[in-house]
């Protein structure tokens, strides 16, 4: 039986950052992930916004962590060598009721100490962002809002945790947990683990994982959301994140200029739907909202649609819970249940929070050897020509472009595989090969050949996505 101080269950954003921050202490960490790769659950599909934090209730952990996380985001992304665009956001309204909501959010933001907030008239907002509809009545400008690639961030955190000694067990599903004298014994489909502490970050399954040993007072009720992505060459793209504040209190909408240069539009909201397949109705909603807020967009430039699933935390009576749910049902057992927005923004802060709590329970000292920095994959396209030429001399495969839309070379693709990519999507999540206008139709074959070569399997055994297994297993639906 393998023995660790802490077993982190779930390799999404929250589990990867929990593992990373636990490595700041003298603790042996195991990260157990059911799937073949990390960040393939909720963390693979979201709106990618790093929120400024103005809409959370003062005095709550969510508000505190979000405002702090936002302030630390540049430093975090420098440590992890991940792109971050602090492009600012404009939350826009089209009528008096929504204007009043924006005023409230502004005042709330001031109370929370969110820097730089400004309420703008419709005309001023349009001057700042000419792509906005003329009929906008007001806007709340938040210069500290930003956007990041969620996959890149989560994978970077996982790599950094591993470099600091955390052991990563992929394709390892937790099936049972029981108490022992030393702490806990975890049964998985790859054997048993003994540990002093458990951190449950199992995303859509977090309520069920807690129920393997303790009752969960919170139930996850998933619902689905749809998104569209417009090509980076599309015209009239906003330079800020645009958020729509509905006049009727209904569904909001975002337009996010991504760090890759494309434009993300969405989400829709489909209650009680749990499928990662997109819905026609959801996509129509997204198109309608986009047309209303950013009328100059050409939606024919859509290169992709996708769906996401939200883990809504509910009480036993079915009422929803607006705050972060952090359960502590037993000594050195912590569960993050139903962490939705702003879970991406707060992933590192939540990890630090859990690490501090557990360090106190386990009496763990600081780890002076902890190195917060992780070198990213060298990207030839980001280098000036002279440096690129030197790189090609060092390794000619930096001169062989495989993905022409995103300018990804053969050497970079090999590097993703050496760092853990096991599928075409795993490569895409690490360097963006296949994310551009042609969506992989020109490079997919070569990516598959490189995967086959590096993994030592026939091309026919290479998968487009991971195993496609069941993060929603057990009645929630299928992935
Ligand atoms: C539609 C949508 C939009 C969002 N937009 C934003 C945003 O713009 N900004 C923001 O800050 N936040 C946003 N969020 C929130 C953010 O995406 C989530 O909080 C975050 O991704 C949650 O990650 P996770 O680690 O909890 O879950 P996951 O990524 O799902 O990770 C859980 C992992 O646990 C594994 N697992 C499950 N059961 C087991 C088991 N028994 N054994 C081992 N492993 C197991 C799964 O395979 C999975 O990999 C959004 C969320 C959604 C759904």
Image (cartoon, rainbow, N blue to C red):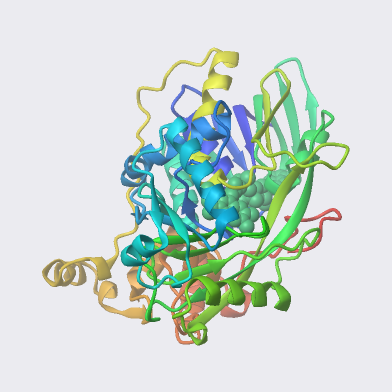
Q: How many numbered marks appear? A: 0
Q: Nearer the viewer, residue 356 or 374?
A: 356
Q: Quadrant of the N terminus?
A: top right
Furthest residue toward front: 96
Vertically, is 117 above or below 227?
Answer: above
In this rendering, position of residue 69 left or right of residue 463: left
In this rendering, position of residue 339 left or right of residue 117: right
Q: Position of residue 122 (x, y in %)?
A: 42, 62
In this rendering, position of residue 304 left or right of residue 112: right
Q: Position of residue 215 (x, y in %)?
A: 84, 30
Q: Position of residue 119 (x, y in %)?
A: 40, 49
Residue at 52 percent across and 64 percent down: it is: 426
- Choose top left, top right, bottom left or bottom right for residue 152: bottom left
Q: Position of residue 234 (x, y in %)?
A: 40, 81
In this rendering, position of residue 456 left or right of residue 370: right
Q: Quadrant of the C terminus?
A: bottom right
Q: Nearer the viewer, residue 93 or 24?
A: 93
Residue at 65 percent across and 24 percent down: it is: 197
Residue at 57 percent across and 20 percent down: it is: 357
- Any part of residue 210 in sight: yes
- Any part of residue 174 in sight: no
Q: Nearer the viewer, residue 105 or 21?
A: 105
Q: Nearer the viewer, residue 293 or 345?
A: 293
Residue at 41 percent across and 55 percent down: it is: 89
């Amino acid at each position: 039986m393998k023995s660790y101080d802490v077993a982190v269950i779930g390799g999404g954003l929250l589990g990867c950052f929990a593992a990373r921050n636990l490595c700041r202490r003298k603790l042996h960490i195991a990260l157990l992930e059911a799937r073949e790769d990390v960040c393939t659950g909720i963390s693979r599909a979201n709106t990618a916004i790093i929120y400024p934090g103005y809409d959370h209730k003062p005095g709550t952990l969510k508000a505190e962590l979000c405002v702090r996380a936002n302030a630390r985001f540049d430093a975090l992304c420098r440590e992890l060598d991940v792109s971050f665009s602090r492009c600012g956001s404009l939350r826009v309204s089209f009528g008096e009721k929504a204007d009043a909501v924006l005023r409230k959010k502004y005042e709330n933001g001031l109370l929370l100490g969110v820097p730089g907030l400004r309420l703008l008239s419709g005309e001023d907002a349009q001057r700042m962002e000419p792509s906005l509809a003329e009929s906008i009545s007001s806007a709340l400008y938040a210069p500290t809002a930003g956007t990041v690639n969620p996959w890149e961030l989560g994978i970077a955190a996982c790599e950094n945790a591993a470099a600091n000694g955390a052991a990563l067990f992929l394709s390892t599903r937790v099936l049972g947990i029981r108490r022992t004298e030393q702490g806990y014994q975890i049964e998985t489909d790859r054997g048993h683990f003994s540990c002093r502490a458990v951190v449950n970050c199992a995303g859509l399954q977090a309520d069920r994982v807690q129920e393997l040993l303790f009752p969960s007072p919170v139930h996850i009720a998933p619902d689905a959301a749809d998104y569209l992505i417009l090509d980076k060459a599309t015209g009239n793209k906003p330079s800020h994140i645009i958020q729509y504040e509905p006049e009727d209190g209904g569904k909001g909408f975002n337009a996010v200029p991504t760090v890759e240069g494309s434009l993300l539009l969405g989400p829709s909201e489909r209650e009680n739907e749990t499928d990662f397949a997109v819905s026609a109705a959801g996509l129509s909603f997204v198109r309608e909202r986009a047309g209303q807020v950013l009328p100059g967009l050409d939606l024919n430039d859509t290169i992709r649609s996708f769906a996401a699933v939200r883990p809504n935390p509910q009480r036993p009576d079915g009422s929803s819970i607006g705050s972060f749910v952090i359960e502590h049902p037993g000594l050195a057992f912590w569960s993050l249940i139903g962490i939705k927005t702003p879970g991406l923004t707060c992933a590192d802060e939540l990890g630090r929070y859990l690490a501090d709590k557990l360090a106190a329970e386990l009496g763990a000292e600081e780890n002076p050897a902890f190195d917060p920095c992780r070198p990213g994959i060298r990207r030839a396209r980001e280098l000036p020509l002279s440096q690129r030429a030197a790189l090609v001399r060092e390794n000619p495969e930096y001169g062989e472009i495989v993905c022409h839309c995103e300018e990804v070379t053969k050497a970079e693709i090999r590097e993703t595989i050496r760092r853990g990519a096991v599928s075409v999507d795993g490569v895409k999540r690490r360097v963006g090969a296949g994310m551009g206008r042609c969506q992989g139709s020109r490079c997919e074959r070569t990516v598959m050949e490189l995967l086959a070569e590096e993994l030592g399997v026939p091309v026919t055994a290479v998968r487009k996505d991971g195993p496609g297994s069941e993060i929603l297993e057990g009645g929630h639906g299928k992935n």
